Image (spheres, rainbow, N blue to C red):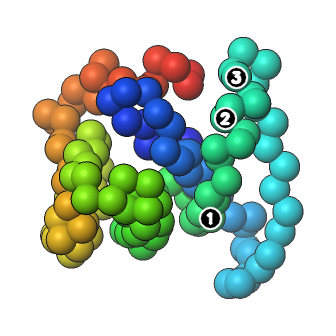
Amino acid sequence: TLLPFVTAAGECVRVFVILRSPKHAPAGLEFTVTLEAPSAARSDSLQSLANYYVVTKTGYLDDNSYAEVMRAFADLWEQQHPGLWCYILADQLNCHKKPEIVEEMALRHIFTVLFAPNTSYFVQPLDGHVF
């Protein structure tokens, strides 16, 4: 899963990559990951920003990995844009709506705006640039 955080001005703040762990991997296993950008992608800019990796059993976000990603993003946002509020556009994935993380991010002035149900296939603004 590729999860880019991009400002309205087009600045790429950070790209998170969520990877699936190897099957039957014991907890705490370390492994090497090699990623290659597609030839159509601007690999120089993508590879320099895709430096935060999260590993889950499925390769998709879950409650814990989403909280980890959001905290890492919030730390970076506050460092790069002190005092500036942030609005995140997201689909209706359950982890995007968890009250604990929504409240934690709101205290840091990071707010999630959810797309209407069943609309993400045509309103997610970055899908057209990645896929």
Q: Residue 55 carries which label?
A: 1
* CA–CA distance in space, label 1 to label 2: 19 Å
Q: Mark 3 points at which residue?
A: 42
Badge 3 crowding class, 10 Å Cα cut-off, few under 14, some 14 to 19, many 20 or more, is: few
User: Three-letter amino acid code at disc 2?
Assistant: Leu
Q: Which residue is drawn at 81% across and 56% down?
A: 33
Asked if residue 78 is positioned above or below residue 5 in the image, the reply reads below
Q: Which residue is drawn at 62% across and 58% down?
A: 52
Tag 3: amino acid: Arg
> As displayed, is residue 50 above or below residue 29?
above
Position in image of residue 118 (x %, y %)? 21, 30
Q: In which quarter of the image is the N terminus?
A: top right
Residue 56 falls in image quadrant: bottom right
Q: Is mark 1 on a helix, strand or loop?
A: strand
**Foreground: 88 or 26?**
88
At label 2, counting other C-alpha atoms closer than 10 Å, the crowd grade (few under 14, some 14-19, many 20 or more) is some
Give the number of callouts: 3
Q: Are marks 2 and 3 in contact (CB under 8 Å)?
A: yes
- Going from N to C along the chain, the mark reached first, 1 or 2, is 2
Q: What element carries label 3?
A: loop
Residue at 59%, 63% in the rendered image: 54
Q: Name the quarter where the C terminus is drawn.
A: top right
- Which quarter of the figure has residue 111? bottom left
Which image quadrant is residue 68 in?
Answer: bottom left
Q: Is residue 124 above or below residue 114?
A: above
Foreground of the two, 59 or 33: 33
Q: In this view, does 117 lie to the left or right of 77?
A: left
Depth check, mark 1 against mark 3: the one in front is 3
Label 2 sits on residue:
46
